[in-house]
Amino acid sequence: MWQGGRNRVAPPWRQPNPGERASRMTDLALVDAYWRAANYLSAGQIYLLDNPLLTEPLTPEHIKPRLLGHWGTTPGLNFLYAHLNRAIRERDVEVLFVTGPGHGGPALLANTWLEGSYSENYPDVPRDEEGMRRLFRQFSFPGGVPSHVAPEVPGSIHEGGELGYSLAHAFGAAFDNPDLLVACVIGDGEAETGPLAASWHGNKFLDPARDGVVLPILHLNGYKIANPAVLARIPHEELDALLRGYGYAPHYVEGADPAAMHARMAEVLDGVLDEVRRIKESGDGERPRWPMIVLRSPKGWTGPSEVDGVPIEGTWRAHQVPLAGVRDNPEHLRQLETWLRSYRPQELFDDHGRPKPELLALAPSGTRRMGSTPHANGGLLLRELRLPSVAAHSVEVTKHGTTTSEPTRVLGRLLRDVMTLNADEKNFRLFGPDETASNRLDAVYEATAKQWQAERLPTDEHLEPNGRVVEVLSEHLCQGFLEGYLLTGRHGLFNCYEAFIHIVDSMFNQHAKWLGTSRKLPWRRSVASLNYLLSSHVWRQDHNGFSHQDPGFIDHVMNKKAEVVRVYLPPDTNTLLSVADHCLRSRDYVNVVVSGKNLTPDWLGPQEAALHCARGAGTWEWAGTADGEPDVVLACAGDAPTLEVMAAAALLREHLPELRVRVVNVVDLMRLQPETEHPHGMPDREFDALFTPDRPVIFAYHGYPWLIHRLTYRRANHVNLHVRGYKEEGTTTTPFDMLVLNDMDRYRLVIDVIDRVPGLGVRAAGLRQLMQDQRTRHHTWIREHGEDLPEVRDWAWPY
Amino acid sequence: MWQGGRNRVAPPWRQPNPGERASRMTDLALVDAYWRAANYLSAGQIYLLDNPLLTEPLTPEHIKPRLLGHWGTTPGLNFLYAHLNRAIRERDVEVLFVTGPGHGGPALLANTWLEGSYSENYPDVPRDEEGMRRLFRQFSFPGGVPSHVAPEVPGSIHEGGELGYSLAHAFGAAFDNPDLLVACVIGDGEAETGPLAASWHGNKFLDPARDGVVLPILHLNGYKIANPAVLARIPHEELDALLRGYGYAPHYVEGADPAAMHARMAEVLDGVLDEVRRIKESGDGERPRWPMIVLRSPKGWTGPSEVDGVPIEGTWRAHQVPLAGVRDNPEHLRQLETWLRSYRPQELFDDHGRPKPELLALAPSGTRRMGSTPHANGGLLLRELRLPSVAAHSVEVTKHGTTTSEPTRVLGRLLRDVMTLNADEKNFRLFGPDETASNRLDAVYEATAKQWQAERLPTDEHLEPNGRVVEVLSEHLCQGFLEGYLLTGRHGLFNCYEAFIHIVDSMFNQHAKWLGTSRKLPWRRSVASLNYLLSSHVWRQDHNGFSHQDPGFIDHVMNKKAEVVRVYLPPDTNTLLSVADHCLRSRDYVNVVVSGKNLTPDWLGPQEAALHCARGAGTWEWAGTADGEPDVVLACAGDAPTLEVMAAAALLREHLPELRVRVVNVVDLMRLQPETEHPHGMPDREFDALFTPDRPVIFAYHGYPWLIHRLTYRRANHVNLHVRGYKEEGTTTTPFDMLVLNDMDRYRLVIDVIDRVPGLGVRAAGLRQLMQDQRTRHHTWIREHGEDLPEVRDWAWPY
């Protein structure tokens, strides 16, 4: 028998032998029993506090006080799970189940309990009567388990609460997993969302040879919360054309009669898996027309067909709890009992509440159980990434700030080596929405190509069916693919224009919540961090303009759990390399790294950079003029602000040499917070030592200035903190004009110093006027010549 | 001749007479000339500082120092604009042009200048040689105009910088505009995004009788920035199936030879407009198969075919500036001159730089020019909304906080009346992602239905082809539709689950930027505000759980220009009504209103509510125990926090009657900011009077607590401010458990008071212990019984 996994020798998509086929009739009776069991356990979770086996007549005391949960989608999920169980057992195939309608939590809880996966992770919910009681009681119950397919559910990489991402997650899971089949159930409600609509095209990025299989199962149960679903209400020919247009060969399983539906589903699933095997074995290099399944079944299938004279089954009214007020309404209580008994629990469970042995025989065993696949607990499969030496890529810095380099271009060379070093392991990918070259990471194409399974032309460059860079003009897909890839135990990085990363704000939310919850589950193993590289940032948008200017993703990220989020603003190339190396080694975080792509002064040598990044924030003694206590602190976070602060420091040294200036640079933004708020937070003592307890601090920050206040408002010296940053001023203009428009240019920073340090006298007043004049001069020059003055463009640190 | 507009008598989709058809050959020469003129003007904008008519040989001094802009998509846009001009002139049809590839700014600037719309709005850029020089110079030039189809561009409602929203905007513009044709150009890059992929289904929400026409024009130029586009690289049959699956009848215009393309485009466009007329005239109630156009033309069409031996035209390399370094590279300069002269400018413009009269004759006149349609400057068409009396919907409050009502349910009745009062004007719509009933606004169905053009079943409720509620399970579509509707001069409201509004964070960004820029343009008239009603909020997620908990949209909104954003947190029903009334009357804002849907105490009577909302924040004297200066301030913003603060105030009054407590409620969150930061900001004097200069303030806030610190860090009493709010703790649980998990329950608030007011003595210590015990008691009870203790569930203000 084929063992699967890394060292398999047998072909992965085994054809069932004729004997197995002949036994299908028996099988289907068993599949039906399994389905009934799962349906029973699902309804039980929604309704029952006690009396789980219905050993006595149902009374109000057995009913939960608050009836919560989503019944509508659940029987369809159970149906699919049971049929997949049969196929897995027959073919010994590895299947990961992705539940698009994640609110159908009862289904997955029921099935993983049935197959034993649940109790292995939660021994306090064993597979017996007491366990069933606890399974029922805990569902949507305070102190129990949530109603969705949350991280608490074994076998899940997809919570499904916010609809739209199932198919993208499925593709991400299938990448570089040639032996894995990802069965992805898509609700017809979810199918209306944008991210899902775009995800169908994932098949243009999947290599039949190197990647696994994604089997989309569009579940048309016809309704959302309160409306019909669009795809359920278009003519068959339109739906069929649409799915074929997406590049699939759809197979339809439609109806309501269980026996007929079982027969049809088995036939279709066998046909589909045969076709998958044929595709996997053919390997002709052409993009295959992957099969998919459309399951059209009633919403709330097998539940009450009518309640109080109103139709329920097959309508939107079955979405949540089909029978309400059961505790107080004897007729509803009676109807619930009839409904529950319709599944004939006594045929399914023995007197101790254990599933009968013939039922258990349907479920696969060990890690072939969908609730126990290691792919759904990716940390089990995670291998360390082999990382190149940062030193090999560092830029040499003999004198601070006198040479320049393009930070992301150098990072591209490091990422190229990451590609090469892990080529055999096939566990690292780079994702980008058509911006990888624009963000200057194109050195990676020396080591790999962009994955592309659509048509190719001779003029194309760097497109291959099996490239390791995924470029699709959808931030949603980049994020969804990467999440699926990471949660199944691999590594990756998403590079994106800074402004447009907001497109995935809500996806980030959900992933951060997933990580936050997973960290509390002892059986969930650590996965690689989700790394964002945000470039083409707010301060350099020569080609674009106002719509491309938004540094607020950092603010958004900061609302999530401190133990999950990290934000880095490396000021130059060597610090970017150090930060990237750190992020690629980290686990269970979301790392946000913001870095420009344009020529930037090399402030720190490799060792200095490593030390500075390890500290996260520190004084650049060589840049300041204060030996001990300064008169003023010039602080900066981000590459553009650092350049301006350095230029301001140079101006002050030239014009007010007696002023003691300290220059502080912050790489790790979390350092600014109190240690009680974030694991990276600085103790007050350290903060005061760096920023002084009482001197003016002029802080030039990459993003919206108020974030710095939010992070530091508890600090002693907060009252003296003056922050400059982006304040929603901008258009298509020169880099320096952007700084002037937002009052963060070097001249403005010098003026800020003069305005805040008391007693500077008449020389300072003269300097202030000079700075004003310089601003005016630049303003005029830029508008006349269309470019920045050479003295700004070519400025280098003069000391 | 048909005059169009509101009082038209002739049919809107006039058939051209045979004589007009016969003249097509002449027309097409003219169309080609017009196209060449637009192409010339587009390239000129990217390259030329001077010598706009090429009256002398091109020298480096004529070239811009920074070469910026996107050439690739531009000739295709120009091609479409010219052909639409012909059709508009022939048929006298009203067309709004939506530029999906908004980075093709040069095209729209060129065309509006050619037709005269531009100079009418910008008299300093006249239609002559000097005007052409300025048109060229200003493009992507400091102090000039941005590179995209930004608000500065006449005829635009769509900036297009962030790709994905063109088709949703087009549908929004077409709603309730039966005589309007919205020609929506969709780039093949944009077509990969999720929002665009979902938008195709907008045709299931468009009534051929009452709404206008959306004509999607999919522009396959084959490439994005650095990659081929997916839809350009699938077989014709797949693309055709996909578009038919979306419900359209695609017509193809494919090629590169201008003459052949002109003939084909004219034929297709005439056929399409004939078909549109047939559909508009048939009115058989069936969803029509709307026609659409696929234009497959080379990227950078008519530009340099090769530069330095590398192919440019027809490849991704034509995306931005096809010829670089023109100032320094004589060969490139020569090539540029050849390219520009290939358009034969001397045939197109007279010696004064004015377009020749025959050219001008192609453009429509007056408001039929696409750059002058009032639909693109919606304020011109905006009518006041007729609003019902708030008093008629208010709930009676004889004693504060003793009755309860469901705020959004009552609001639903007000919205129902808005529907009725404006039924004739057809200028108000409600949008929601399948959540309108869940958010309890379903009273609106007494006045109108949900718009639905897909199949209907007898069991369906409230679905009609011409309903005024648009429900589609895509926040992107709701937002995009509403934006298009508002920017064309109508009114609306988007109701959404609070957590999932983050899905449109980036769309909000772009709309807020659009409004911010529009406010500075004197010729742009005010449009109705974009109103969000966020319900099913973080504190009540009994059915769902952690993934449905995120109050951070407020934080996100706060990063945009203060003059554009408003945030309201009405604590009860009457305040919600007052706020909604205010928002529906307002202009040019984004209003965010957060309100629960569950039973909530009625704190304020109608008059009190109106006064409180007008103030935005104030003391509830009747709730506190302080006559003059208080010992402590209990502040709250949001319905759940208000309830807890009131319960805490009652506990303090009972147990520590000598403590002087002031209760402050904040409805308008912007009031907390300094007046220098926001137009609604409170002066320090007023803030100090409300929150005291030196007493402890315990602030219970609806969202993430740090936002309150961000808003108040400059205030004198900030040091004494202690904020409770949501801190990312939650699951599927009871309402009170949510409060306890996040330390915002009434007992915790009392403890906060005791811990912060000095000298309370031994009685307070006893109370503190009691509160601790209560928390424990509740915690245990909830986990045992699965519901909240009746004393919490049924609590009412006792004084």
Image (tube, coloured by chain):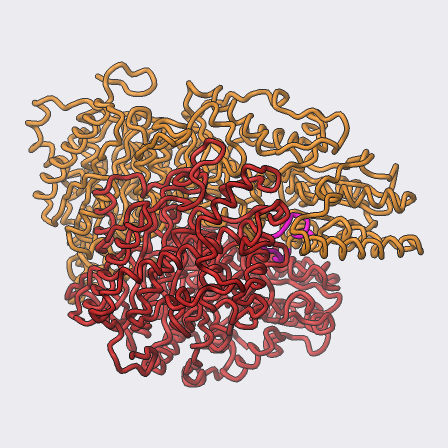
Chain colours: A red, B orange
Task: Answer with the quarter of the image where residue A449 lies.
Answer: bottom left
Q: Residue at x 34, y 50 (%)?
A: A219
Q: Is residue B161 visible?
A: no
Q: Give A242 or A782, whichever is nearer the viewer.
A: A242
Q: Is residue B376 left or right of residue B183?
A: right
Q: Give B239 or A524, whichever is nearer the viewer.
A: A524
Main secondary structure found in the magenta portion: loop
Q: Which corner quadrant holds the C terminus of chain A?
A: bottom right
Q: Residue at x 21, y 42 (%)?
A: A237
Q: Which corner quadrant holds the N terminus of chain A?
A: bottom left
Task: Answer with the quarter of the image where residue B489 lies.
Answer: top left
Q: Give A140 or A50, whichever is nearer the viewer.
A: A50
Find residue B495 and report its horizontal and vertical position in percent.
50, 38
Task: Tell me if residue A32 comes above or below residue A281 in the rendering.
Answer: above
Find residue A609 and report its horizontal and vertical position in percent.
53, 79
Task: Tell me if residue A755 comes above or below residue A597 in the rendering.
Answer: above
Task: Tell me if residue B251 comes above or below residue B573 in the rendering.
Answer: below
What span is colored magenta in the figure?
A: B727-739
Please tell me whether residue B644 belongs to the stretch shown in magenta: no
Find residue A276 and report its horizontal and vertical position in percent.
23, 65
Q: Give B416 or B798, whichever is nearer the viewer.
A: B798
Q: Is residue A609 left or right of residue A486?
A: right
Q: Is residue A514 visible?
A: yes
Q: Residue at x 76, y 52 (%)?
A: B721
Please tell me whether residue B728 belongs to the stretch shown in magenta: yes
Which residue sits furthest right? B762
